[in-house]
Image: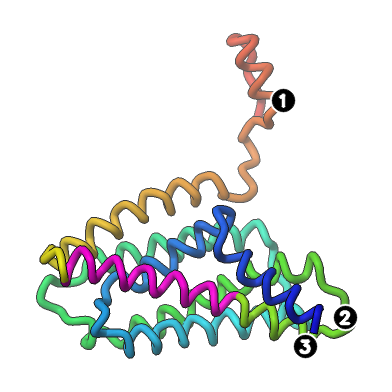
Amino acid sequence: MQDFTIYFKLGVEHILSLDAMDHILFVTALCLRYLSKDWKKVVILVTAFTIGHSLTLALSALGLVNFDSSWIEFLIPLTIAATCINNMLQPANAPASRLPWIYSLALFFGLIHGLAFANLFLSLEGREGLVAHLLAFNIGIEIAQLVIVLGILLLSYVFVEAGKLSRIWWLRTASSVILVFSLIWAVQRFPYQKNAPTHDEKVRIAGNPGVIIAG
C-alpha cells in the first residue's frame, strides 16, 4: 500500500507542477472549446486522451516500445500547437458537438504524451511490482488531469457564461497565448541541432566576438 501511495503521489506531482506546464497547457487547449454545460463531452475527450497515454505508458513500461526521448519532448509542444491552431480555426457558429473528430485527435496525441510520461516512470521503476506501480502512477496522472479540467471549466464559466464574453473570442485568445508558448518550446527542444554552439562555445563567442564556430 505504501508503494501505491508513493507512485500515486508521483503521478499527481508529475502533472501538477511547473515542470509539467507543457502537459497542463495541452489539456487546457483541449478543453478550451467547452463550457460547464458540456461536461459530458469533456469526460469523453479526457477519456480518449487517457486511453492514448495509458496505452503507450504501459507498452513503454513493459519494454515493448522505445522511442528517443529527445524527439518525444520535441513532439509534445507540436501537439499543443496543433490543438491551438485547430481551436483558432473553429468557425464561430460551430458548436463543439459537431466536432467529434477532436476525440480522435486527443487519442492520437495521448499516445505521444504517454511516451513522455514513461520517461519519468522508467527512470524510477524496477521490474518488481510493475503493474501495481503503473496503475498507481496512472491514477495519479488522471486525478491531476481532472483538477486541471475542472479549473478550465471554472474559468470558462467565469469568463464566458458569467462574464458574457464571446465563446469564440475566449477560445481563440486563450489558444493564441498557449500557441506562443508551444512554439517557443518546440524551437528550444528541437533535437540534433548539429550546428548550434554549446554553452561553452557561446561563452567563448561572447568574450571574443571575432570567433567563428565551424559547423
Residue 198 figure quarter: top right
Residue 23 point in image, percent of width and height: 51, 64
Closer to the N terminus: mark 1 or mark 3? Answer: 3
Quick check: 160 above or below 35?
Answer: above
Which residue bears the numbered disc 1? 200
Observer-side mark, 1 or 3, equals: 3
Residue 108 point in image, percent of width and height: 48, 79
Q: As shown in the figure, which amino acid type bears the numbered disc 2?
A: Arg
From the viewer's side, name the closer residue of 110 and 47.
47
Q: Residue at x 55, y 53 (%)?
A: 18
Q: As shown in the figure, which amino acid type bears the numbered disc 3?
A: Val
Query: Crowdedness of circle 3 by 10 Å Cα count: few (<14), some, many (20+)?
Result: few
Observer-side mark, 1 or 2, equals: 2
Distance Cα–Cα, label 1 vs label 2:
39 Å
Q: What kind of element bears circle 3?
A: helix
Q: What kind of element bears circle 1?
A: helix
Closer to the N terminus: mark 1 or mark 2? Answer: 2
Q: As shown in the figure, which amino acid type bears the numbered disc 1?
A: Asp
Distance Cα–Cα, label 3 vs label 2:
9 Å
Quick check: 36 above or below 177?
Answer: below
Which residue bears the numbered disc 2? 127
Q: How many numbered circles are shown?
A: 3
Q: Which residues are magenta?
A: 141-161
Which residue bears the numbered disc 3? 131
Name the side, left or right, on which 85 lies relative to 118: left
Q: Which image quadrant: the N terminus?
A: bottom right
* Residue 63 seen in the figure: no
Q: What kind of element bears circle 2?
A: loop
Q: Which image quadrant: the C terminus?
A: top right
